[in-house]
Image: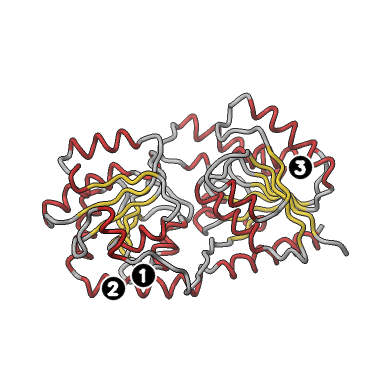
Amino acid sequence: MGKVKILHVTSTTTGGSAFSLLLLLKYLDRKVFDISIAMPPDGPFYCDIVKTQVQVYPLTISRQPFHYCNIRGFRQLRKILQKGMFDIVHTHTSVGGFLGRIAAKSVGIPCVIWTIHGWAFNYSHSTFVQRRFFKTIEKFLDRFTDHYVAVSRNMLEVGIQARVTISEKVSVIYHGIETDENEIRVHHNNLRKELGIGENIPLVGNIGRIEPQKAVDDFLRAARIIKDAIPNVNFLVVGDGPLRNDMEKLSMQLGIKDVVLFTGWKKNVKEYMDIIDVVCIPSLWEALPFLLLEAMYTKKPVVATHVGGIPEVVDDGKTGILVPPSRPEVMANAIITLIENKRIAKEMGEAGKRRVQQLFSVEQMITHYEKLYLDLLKKK
């Protein structure tokens, strides 16, 4: 028997879905699997994906579901599939999943998978009409889907409750991260010095894309409350996005511009993580954020919202503190507790690292995926 030929399809190389895909490309056993990917040739992880030396097929598609270029991308994808003789097509993202699943089944691919990084009908900022429309689309796509991978149990439950599919068609495979104990980091005080932040200044950080989902405005409103209680505290917003200018203006309006640093995109995110005392994740919805795993692995106590798959990672009160979304005052109080109680913060950080090592390593993630691929093909 030859290698199992897998084509991954995605509409973006940005965010957690792209990072998860990058890990799959890096660590799947090349002796067993012949791996290719179809994707747009841009985005922050594009170069990293190319470096894995898998076959890359450029696609002209957009994250925007109704963009005209997606018609062209669908045609490109069908041509790739007709020539490739793939055993499995594994799709990611909403648009990648829509185009990829239909294209794959239209040319007779035996096994088609979609990873649930999020359900479009489950986003809190959507209107009722939008949620109803996207739910109808997902129910329609179920007939083109042999199997789903949910990155958290919450994502599975949302799909089942919405009657999009049945539980027998879904496997839960948590994200995993690389846990290299020998990783070299910039010395703690050097980066702080570059940023103009003193060694003993409490530093609270938010890392990620600055967009509605991430609720950076709630983080800034919490920062205003924290500054009133702890005057020498500083804050980092590491990342960029469509709302960055709005958030910088908000920090001025709140009177905290002098203690909030917006760094923009950074490749060395782990070095910034290293100097932060408390990591805050104020998201309105999440499937299972990689940032949370990275923070816990680096022994950082976390304050995160009780949404999506986050409670499956954070053991509330032991590895971090969970708070309701859109409640900056509750978030602020939790962060103040961790800043003022260093012993508790340290214990939470150490417990968080142990939890990631036990449940969220990349080795476990890859083992589960490899077994799933082979089991699904046996059934076919």
Image quarter of residue 77: top right
Residue 346 - label: 2
Disc 3 marks a residue whose amino acid type is Ala
Residue farthest toward the top in the current orientation of the protein: 68
**Of residues 328 and 37, which is closer to you in this image?**
37
Give the secondary structure at mark 1. Answer: loop
Which residue is pictured at 55% across the width and 57% down the height? Answer: 151
Q: Which residue is mark 3?
A: 104
Distance from Cα at disc 1 to Cα at disc 2? 7 Å
Q: How is the image coloured?
A: secondary structure
Which residue is pictured at 17% across the width and 53% down the height? Answer: 226
Percent x, y of residue 337: 20, 64
Give the secondary structure at mark 2. Answer: helix
Which residue is pictured at 54% across the width and 62% down the height? Answer: 174
Residue 299 - label: 1
In this rendering, the label closer to the viewer, 3 or 1: 1
Q: Is residue 54 above or below residue 142?
A: below
Percent x, y of residue 145: 70, 47
Disc 2 marks a residue whose amino acid type is Lys
Query: Given contact means CB atoms under 8 Å apart, are the residues at marks 1 and 2 in contact?
Result: yes
Distance from Cα at disc 3 to Cα at disc 2? 49 Å
